[in-house]
Image: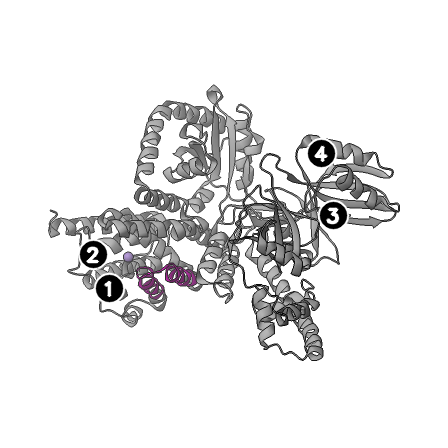
Amino acid sequence: MTSSVSYEKELTRQLAALRRYLMNERKMSVSDWKEIRRAYKFAKEAHAGVTRKSGEPYIMHPMAVARIVAEEMGLFRDSIIAAFLHDVVEDTDYTLEDISREFNVRVSEIVDGLTKMSKLSFEDKTISTQAENFRRILLTISEDIRVILVKIADRLHNMRTLEFQKDHKQLKIASETLFLYAPLAHRLGLYNIKSELEDLSLKYSQPAIYQEISSRLDKTKEEANDYIEMVKRTVSELVTTTALSFKIKSRFKSIYSIHKKISEKGVSFEEIFDLYAIRIILETRDGHEFEDCWKVYAAISAVYYPNPTRTRIWLSTPKESGYQALHMTVIGPEGKWVEIQIRTERMDDLAEKGPSAHWRYKKMIEESASSEGNDTIEHDYDVLLADWVDQIRTILENPELSALEAVQEVRRSIRPEDMQVFTPKGQIIRLPTDATVIDFAYYVHTKVGQHAIGAKVNGRVVSLDYILQTGDQCEVLTSTKQQPKEEWLKFVKTTRAKNMIKEVLRQQRREYIVKGKEIFIWYAKRHKVTENSEMVKEFIKYLSLDGLEDLYYNLGRRNLEISKIQEFNQLRSEGKLYPQEKTTPLDTELLVLGKNITIEKYESATCCNPVPGDDIIAFHKGTKAIIHRTSCEKAINMMATHGDQIVKVRFTDKDSLSYLTALKIEGLDRQGILIDILQIISRVMHINMRKVTIDTKDGLFQGLFLVYLKNKDELDRLTTRLKSLDNVTSVMRTDSKFQPFEEE
Ligand code: MN
């Protein structure tokens, strides 16, 4: 049992440590320090008599948060004061007005944001209210970034003392931390804090895994110690030749990132070769930072060969989080791979303290008259940060997104693993790591996105869903005929591009609806029906359409001919309509034979329950198809009455699976060439086809043929046959998104 006297002693000790840090290392003015001390006393008095779950007096918590804010985040007076006061309004009788009067408006605004957030994050009941809470938490970011910084510090201390919480609370707090606070810390460039938050989350959410990795890591640290010391010595000698002043350290991968690598890449602990890295921190020389980093790189490469594919350059173009460094991986002593990170003191400070370090250096640069020739501020961090905050606000305020979707979008945007792709002129475009050509196109310009048909990446033609890599040079190919397509939404990754595509599709849909309505009205007048008539309602239900608007849309898009209503009406009045069939969804891949229609969903009729191997037939209704066995009574009747809705389908035969293969065939155009090609594919070789797109230009033709092939042998035979045709110059496999003459 700890007595109150010893808590007093502890608090005095902590306050003295904070004072020492601020006054000595940060050169804080005495008057600022006095304000901070006053905040401490105010909070201590306000929380007097209250204890935490650990049994400590409550004030120990704000003290810890204030020290994190000051010492680990490097923030300034008002944030430190706000950290001391962050729970006062929430937990005591003091109001915001009291704080604003006692301290200043800025402090009270930060405390206000924090109070709103703490009210939110502990009352969740369902996923959606939880998501709504996250949404509001994120909205506070756009008010004042310091609110979220103090909140992260608060969360860090709560995680450090999580052992005192009940089990279910531990899990909830840990998962919230992993979901939101760790990514935020990462995005803000607080790397140490991010790693600690992740490790602590893992410790409570998956204790067995955490213990396992942690003990193996400890063992490795012991075993690798001599080797690391030796590398440090030899690398030190090399760096010394540059005559620069430096410090050398080593760091191990965090437990969480090891866990992530093992589970995502499917490797074992022993297979992780970058378990540790050597870090060289150079004394900052204004105007020579990048040059100095490269000098060190060259000095090390002179002896240890770097793997060029693993060199990471974040100098003139930092990561989105502001991170700057030069990383190299070399074959070190004994032929082992070693990662070496080269940074200046300033870059190191940025990597540890994030925003506050950026603000501090910016101020220093602005204050120093000799900022000329300085190569460190090409990318204004505040501008980047403001862009990001803007982006978050746009997502959160989008009325089309549910709270959950909005939070997921924001999480996407805070993932700092981004890449840089170059335009043909060498301009850099930043994109998330899994971005595709279409994302890139929309970032270049809306019009480029809307009309994109493909791209040349490093000189090679690729389709719109091609996933870009960092360093790629990408030239978007456009065609004025091109229009945004629904299928783009399946692979587009960035919110910006997604929203723009959706907007155009919405417009298109509106146009189709108007057109479809005109068609309907024309029909309705002649047949004396109204849009509200029972027959029309039944028709909509019969086709499983989503209401009247959907009917218009399908009519306008020509997915559905108006004559179908008349046929339906006829069958209905003759009593030949079949009742809605009972069906179950079907996962199996089916081959559609003959007809060129799009079927998005297959359902299996429960009257005959077809299974793979059966001969089957499908009736399509809109984009849905219902499968019956060909022997089914009902199906036989339906074939008679609904002949035009029949689609011939076949279960993919398990023994002779067919693979969809895209062939690009080109040559000199002549009459009948298409027929000749089709003859060979279907008549001679009996190969099923899914789609054919062909185009001619200046006497040449190019075509895309999507065919189902059983194996390579069949492909070779087909290729040989096709090549033997007059005027066919080449037959090759291509991407299924290929469009004829897309290079133009
Ligand atoms: Mn707190």
Write down the residue under mark 2: 58
Q: SS class of the residue under badge 1?
A: helix
Q: Earlier in the sequence, mark 4 or mark 3?
A: 3
Q: Earlier in the sequence, mark 4 or mark 2?
A: 2
Distance CA(mark 4)–CA(mark 2): 74 Å
Task: Estimate how packed mark 4 is, as few (under 14), some (14 to 19) or many (20 or more) residues with alpha carbons within 10 Å.
Answer: some
Question: Nearer the observer, disc 3 or disc 2?
Answer: 3
Distance CA(mark 3)–CA(mark 2): 72 Å
- Magenta-drawn stretch contains 472: no
Q: Are marks 4 and 3 in contact (CB under 8 Å)?
A: no
Task: Estimate how packed mark 1 is, as few (under 14), some (14 to 19) or many (20 or more) residues with alpha carbons within 10 Å.
Answer: few
Q: Amino acid at mark 3?
A: Val
User: Relative to 656, does residue 224 appear above or below in the rendering?
Assistant: above
Q: Which mark is residue 91?
A: 1
Write down the residue under mark 4: 715
Write down the residue under mark 3: 692
Span highlighted in magenta in the image: 110-139
Distance CA(mark 4)–CA(mark 1): 73 Å
**Residue 685 location (% of width, % of height):** 75, 37
Question: Nearer the observer, disc 4 or disc 2?
Answer: 4
Q: Earlier in the sequence, mark 1 or mark 3?
A: 1
